[in-house]
Image (cartoon, rainbow, N blue to C red):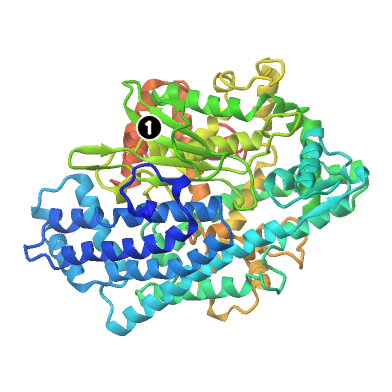
Amino acid sequence: MQNPLLQPFDQAPFEQIKNENFKPAFLRAIEDAKIQIDKIAKNPDPPTFENTLEALDFSGRQLDRISSVFFNLNSAETNDEIQKIAQEISPLLSEFSNDITLNEELFRRIKSVYQQKNSLNLSTEQQTLLEKRYKSFSRNGANLGDDAKKRLREIDAELSKLKLKFGENVLAETNKFELFLTDEKDLNGLPDGAKEAAAQLAKTKNKEGWLITLDYPSYIPFMKYAENRELRKKLSLAFGSKGFHNDALDNQENVLKIATLRYERANLLGYQTHAHFVLEERMAETPEKVHAFLAELLEKAKPAAEKEFEALASFAKELDGLSQLEKWDSSYYSEKLKQKLFDLDDEKLKPFFKLENVIDGVFKVAEKLFDLNFKEVTSIEKYHEEVKTFEVYDSSKNLVSLFYADFHPRPGKRGGAWMTSYKPQYTLDGKNSRPHISNVCNFTKPTDTKPSLLTFNEVTTLFHEFGHALHGMLANTTYPSLSGTSVYWDFVELPSQVLENWCYEKEALELFAFHYETGEVIPMDLVEKIKQSATFQEGMATLRQLSFGLLDMAWHGTDPTHITNVKSYESEAFKGTDLFPNIPETCMSTAFSHIFQGGYSSGYYSYKWAEVLDADAFAFFKENGIFNKEIANKFKEHILSKGGTENPMILYKRFRGAEPKIEPLLERAGLVEKSS
């Protein structure tokens, strides 16, 4: 039988793929890619940019496509069989990657072209590709001796398995916990929609009553509204102790091993720490600059956060006589205080944010800014019936991209929200091959009586991920490795974070925020309250983000070999940012997937870094109108379409006319007075 993954395909053939197709497809595609690499390395002709660098960038495309299909399924629709295949395949992919970067003949050819770079008359994009590829080889062991290369291969193979195991444990812990409630009094305070969703969830398990899980759409409303403090505590402890139970799903050993192996790898390559290695290829450049940046924000945010925390503690004491505010009280009393100060309740907002309307709204924003049109189609194969598929066109009716959207939690889907790609954009043989982009989220499901109604936070999440999607869709480069979101990691969040700003603007909200029953446009007093409340507890929120960035740097910016206790080391890292009492039973690191499974190691600071860029960029829009075509075209031309073809600061300055300033962020967050 023919393997659908080994046939030429443009759209991913999801409906034809069986799990047993993956391993043979990987093995064959790795072999084919090795032959292509070998041909480049052993080419008898003198090395040129075309026959070496360009050939290398376009090699292994079948393997890349199979990998993108497989690993996206492992995140969005996984099962035991897929996880087992991932454990078998990841070390092979890691070894193949090493086979390329440690190939001496290939590196000699790249080095030869690199040494002639000033006489080759290369375009800016070609220069970037040459620099990036040469550095990638030298940064990943091409200049090492044989013993060191062998050790590097061992480390990379082990890391690939450990990171997968870490993620599998977090998903298993999330799926394992269930809070079944049979007494309706335990749901006091919960909005009707959340109650109905909990009852429906219980039904799926053939139980009578209500089921609360650790998936965000279930967990967050309970923490925000449930009056039963003991149950909030139970849920909070379960959420905060994922991978921290000294059992088969424990991640403490995985954390220590990952941190130590990354440190050893960096040392092997001549770097002081993993953070020194990573940050060399970031806008921030060094751990010192990251620490200085975090310290500057901490100095501004901490006094505000402490003041907000005191106000929250006083409010809880006054309301319920609470003598000590704990982590499981935070969302509950914050929501009550927010309602009191702004008369703004998420439940009042949700009827105006029906999922389908918000999707339509983000499409309209993209149309007004970037002339894009989205057409839902049913002819594209998908991996789950809930996935929606769209063709994206420009104003001349040219196909820009395919877009997959997957919005609700399922047992086989990891938590959170992300953008991914099934096919990158590139230009080959004069043809501009367009990308296939996907957004995956975990939003509140529709119930028997209500459609999917989003919280305002879910609305901003949808806009955020769609900003990443636009970065992928509007890519317009030559080489796949420089296309779309293939940019410095502390630049990648700019398109996503800047798009969130439109959620707070009357002009944008009027496009999609209609009451799902009456069709009434969101009242402007509610819009005003949303804007006023945007800085509510921003000091606390900033401190929380900074604490994650500092924890990341603690794991990756020092020698971790002396660490024996994950929890106490984490507590030490959090010391300067702690507001709530420490909870011995919980541990952040053992479920910190961003840095131990995803690509954010030594990069968590980039969320805040990109906020500086996005606040500065949006200030430019605000000065000229949020749908100003000229500014939007500049953003599209210099940021969204250029991918990683040039240094991001050069691109940003072309868009903005100057380097970003930190003041717009501090003003937006209410941490300093607005300059008049």
Residue at the spot x=38%, y=42% of the render? 11
Residue 251 placed where, x, y %?
Answer: 62, 70
Residue 338 occupies which quadrant of the picture? top right
Q: Residue furthest bottom?
A: 147
- Give the residue pinned by disc 1: 635
Asked if residue 34 is positioned above or below residue 336 in the image, the reply reads: below
Nearer to the camera, 106 or 498: 106
Look at the image and tell me in which quarter the N terminus lies.
Answer: bottom left
Q: Does the rendering let one see residue 94?
A: yes
Residue at the spot x=78%, y=34% of the render? 193
Asked if residue 545 is positioned above or below residue 662 in the image, the reply reads: below
Q: Residues within 10 Å of mark 1 (few under 14, many from 20)?
A: many
Residue 601 placed where, x, y %?
Answer: 49, 61
Look at the image and tell me in which quarter the C terminus lies.
Answer: top right
For this view, does 28 lie left or right of residue 355? left
Residue 348 placed where, x, y %?
Answer: 75, 27
Asked if residue 421 is positioned above or below residue 348 in the image, the reply reads: below
Q: Does the rendering let one see residue 663?
A: no
Residue at the spot x=68%, y=49% of the render? 303
Residue 485 placed where, x, y %?
Answer: 39, 46
Under mark 1, the amino acid is Phe
